[in-house]
Each structure stands twice: as structure tokens, then as C-alpha cells.
Amino acid sequence: MSNTIERIKCLIIGSGPAGYTAAIYASRADLNPVMYTGMQMGGQLTTTTEVDNFPGYPNGTDGTAMMEDLKKQAERFGTEVRFGLATAVDFSNEVGGIHKVTIDGSKQIEAETVIITTGATAKYLGLESEEKLKGGGVSACATCDGFFYRKQDVVVVGAGDTAAEEATYLANICNKVTMLVRKDYFRASKAMEHRVNKTENIEVLFNTELDEVLGDNVVEGVRVVNNKTGDKHEIPVTGVFIAIGHKPNTEIFKGQLDMDETGYLITKGKSTKTNKPGVFAAGDVQDHEYRQAVTAAGTGCMAALDAERYLGSLD
């Protein structure tokens, strides 16, 4: 492990819309932020081919290009963007205390404030064909990508509230939505189940699992299997939405920061403050409800302002 310890005023862990927006605001507040991007520079949005719902892009853009724009804007104001992964943390319990973060298992950082924007990772089934067609018709966000399947037939995989919400959202814009439910019952709330059942263009297939996503470069259909009978059949669709949940990237913060039962960081009230003074969380790492680029960017702004005010209160 390196013996050199670097002291900085504001450390941002993770990139994406929340991280880069926090960096823009922190830079303009003279906090001299240093960002470690994580292994996926730009976050989840870099896996999205088209982004049509982020303000300021009247003709749309793609996720990678948008993250590059945000990165350049943060760097323009003085953010130092570094590629690296936070592997351990030791957060102080004291107001004005110094927080210690290990990068890539060796480099030691001491920070007066830390903004966590490590995001959440969508859960997938693990099929090779599913992986191959991500961005070509396989998605984990109906709100993000549903528009591109207007008046088309799509499949939603899942049985919980998220799957039910995605299916009813898609039903408003798609020709037909087929839900694949692994058990013979929903895990969703009764209210969401009733909403699905009342929607005429949603068909629910119980005891049914996704066996294969069909297509070479884009989704052309799916092969499904009845897990009771073993019978398989194909359904022609152009979009496949995997709605089996997200996993927040918070493993290294366990035992340090307060989390809910699924691992999302808990922030205080309408702020981005965690239970440790000088440590803030923004974006999908603390938002299991909206999970949109624009809401992540908004909380990134909030985190930078919270960090600025925290440091100001120490003077």
C-alpha cells in the first residue's frame, strides 16, 4: 500500500449525471473537487444508445456523448477527473473530521468532504443473448427507452411493483405488452396487480421464463419456457424490458453509512446528507424510486451545495 497520502477538500466517488453535476457545482464553488470515476466512466447511461428525455438536447443524444459533455464541462471549471475505483472507506464521526478513502487498494486519500455517486446496477438474467442485445432492444428502463417502441410489441420480465409499473407505462405507448412472471402469482402490491389486470393490452404469462432473446443486431423476438410443463414457444417482439430490480453500488459503505434493507444509502430529509458529517450521497445510490438522469443530476447539484455549506459552517 502506498505511503503517500493526498489531502483534498472535496472527493467525488463515481461519475454519471450525479457525479459530474456535483463536480460542476463544486468546482464553481472553489472546492477543487477530485473525482474517481469508478470502473464504468460515465455510469449506467453509457450503456444507453439514445437519450431523448434529458433537457437541453432537442434532437436527442446518446448516453456516452452526453456523459462526455458533462465531463468536459466539469473539467472546464477545474475538476480533476481520474479513472479509479474506491475500494475502502473510513468515515469520521466528527464534524470537521477527515474522511479516509482507499483507491484501487493502495492509494490513500484524505478528504474534508465526500460526495458518493456510485449509482445502482440493473439486475439482468445473465443470458448471453440478453447481454449481446443490450442497447439493441434489451433495456432495464421503460421510462428511458419505451418511447422508441411506440406502437410496437414488447415483453416485460418481472413480477414486482417495478415490473407492473413498467408494463402499465409501456401499455400507454406500445401496441401490446407481454409480462413474463416466473411464479404463478405477482409479487407486486394488490393495487399494482389490479392496474395490470385492468389494462387490456397487457397479457400476463405465469410460470413463464425468458429462455432466449432472438435477433442478431436488434431484438426480433423472444423464446419463452413454461417452467411447469417445459413447453417453449416464440413471441415476436422488438423490445425486452428486464424489470427484476437494481442493486445499489454500496458494498464498501456497509458498516459506515446508514442504508435501507436493500442497500440504498439513506439521506436526511430533503438533503443529501448521510449519517456521517461531511459525507453526502446523490443519484441512484440513494434513489430507488425515480432513477432518471435528470433527477440524478439534480441531487448532484444538491450534494455540492450541501458540501459547500458544510465547509462554510466550519470556518
Image (tube, rainbow, N blue to C red):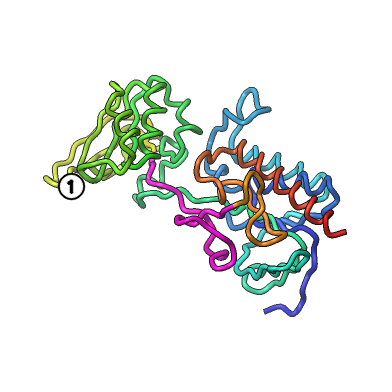
Element on which disc 1 rests: loop
Question: Which segment is the magenta one?
Answer: 242-266
- What x and y, as percent, mark residue 267? 61, 51
Q: Residue furthest left?
A: 229
Q: Is residue 15 above or below residue 147?
A: below
Q: Is residue 9 above or below residue 271?
A: below
Q: Position of residue 135 (x, y in %)?
A: 47, 38
Compared across the picture, whether 42 is left or right of 302 comes to left
State the image quarter where residue 171 is shown: top left
Q: Is residue 252 magenta?
A: yes
Residue situated in front as seen by the camera: 264 or 118: 264
Query: Among all residues in the image, which is located at the extreme front?
Result: 269
In the displayed structure, does residue 49 sit left or right of residue 56?
Answer: left
Q: Name the residue located 73 percent from the left edge and 54 percent from the top edge.
A: 81
- Look at mark 1 in the image and give the residue it sits on: 227
Q: Residue at x 34, y 36 (%)?
A: 156
> Which secondary structure type mostly characterizes the magenta part of the structure?
loop
Magenta stretch holds residue 86: no
Asked if residue 44 shows in the view, the reply is yes
What residue is rendered at 41% in x and 28% in y? 169
Q: In the depicted view, which residue is nearer to us: 244 or 302?
A: 302
Q: Circle 1: is it few (<14), some (14-19), or many (20+) Cα within 10 Å?
A: some
* Mark 1: amino acid: Asn
Residue 277 x, y percent position in the rendering:
70, 61
Instruction: Determine the residue positioned at 66% across, 39% down.
Output: 298
Q: Quadrant of the N terminus?
A: bottom right
- Residue 311: x percent and y percent? 81, 56
Q: Residue furthest right?
A: 315
Q: Is residue 186 left or right of residue 80?
A: left
Instruction: Decide if residue 206 is on the left or right side of residue 30.
Output: left
Count the labels in the image.
1
